[in-house]
């Protein structure tokens, strides 16, 4: 979270921030509650102090390299419904800064 806060502060040149929007995949390995707590702590005494943290959850999607089908895995170690583990994760493991609203 410190990296996100630092990136926003560096780019906004002192402007006050109202909302920070993140997109976080369900398979990103991120504890959203801990992230919210860290946001409040990391933004103290910055132009982000008091800003809202809006988090959008990204559902996982994978494409099987064996059968070509797409499915929604519940975990990184879950195989395709065809039984193959040879798959490409298309979405669900990202942590992305989407948007910043300034006052």
Image (spheres, rainbow, N blue to C red):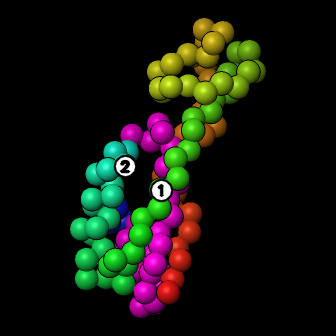
Q: Residue at x 27, y 59 (%)?
A: 37
CA gap, disc 1 and disc 2:
8 Å
Bounds of the magenta segment: 4-29
- Asked if the magenta segment contains residue 11, the reply would be yes
Q: Is residue 16 above or below residue 44?
A: below
Q: What is the crowding at mark 2: few (fewer than 14 residues within 10 Å), some, or many (at least 20)?
A: few
Can you name the residue that lies furthest to the bottom here? 14
Q: Is residue 26 above or below residue 55?
A: above
Residue 55, label in figure: 1
Can you name the residue that lies furthest to the right here? 68
Residue 80, label in figure: none
Do we see residue 13 in this rendering? Answer: yes
Do we see residue 7 in this rendering? Answer: no
First in residue order: circle 1 vs circle 2:
2
Q: Is residue 60 above or below residue 74?
A: below
Q: Residue at x 53, y 77 (%)?
A: 101
Q: Quadrant of residue 49?
A: bottom left
Q: Secondary structure at mark 2?
A: helix
Q: Secondary structure at mark 1?
A: strand
Residue 58 place in picture, x, y as percent: 56, 44
Can you name the residue that lies furthest to the top here? 83
Q: Are marks 1 and 2 in contact (CB under 8 Å)?
A: yes
- Asked if the magenta segment contains residue 37, the reply would be no
Q: Quadrant of residue 17?
A: bottom left
Residue 32 place in picture, x, y as percent: 37, 49
Residue 32, label in figure: 2
Q: Residue at x 34, y 61 (%)?
A: 1
Q: Residue at x 52, y 73 (%)?
A: 100
Relative to 46, 61 lies left or right: right
């Amino acid at each position: 979270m410190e990296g996100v806060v630092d990136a926003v502060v560096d780019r906004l040149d002192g402007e006050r921030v109202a909302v920070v929007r993140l997109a976080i995949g369900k398979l990103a390995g991120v504890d959203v509650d801990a992230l919210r707590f860290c946001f409040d702590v990391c933004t103290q005494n910055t132009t982000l102090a008091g800003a809202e943290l809006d988090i959008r959850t990204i559902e996982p999607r994978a494409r099987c390299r064996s059968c070509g089908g797409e499915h929604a895995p519940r975990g990184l170690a879950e195989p395709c419904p065809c039984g193959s583990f040879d798959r490409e994760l298309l979405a669900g493991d990202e942590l992305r800064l989407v948007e910043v609203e300034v006052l």
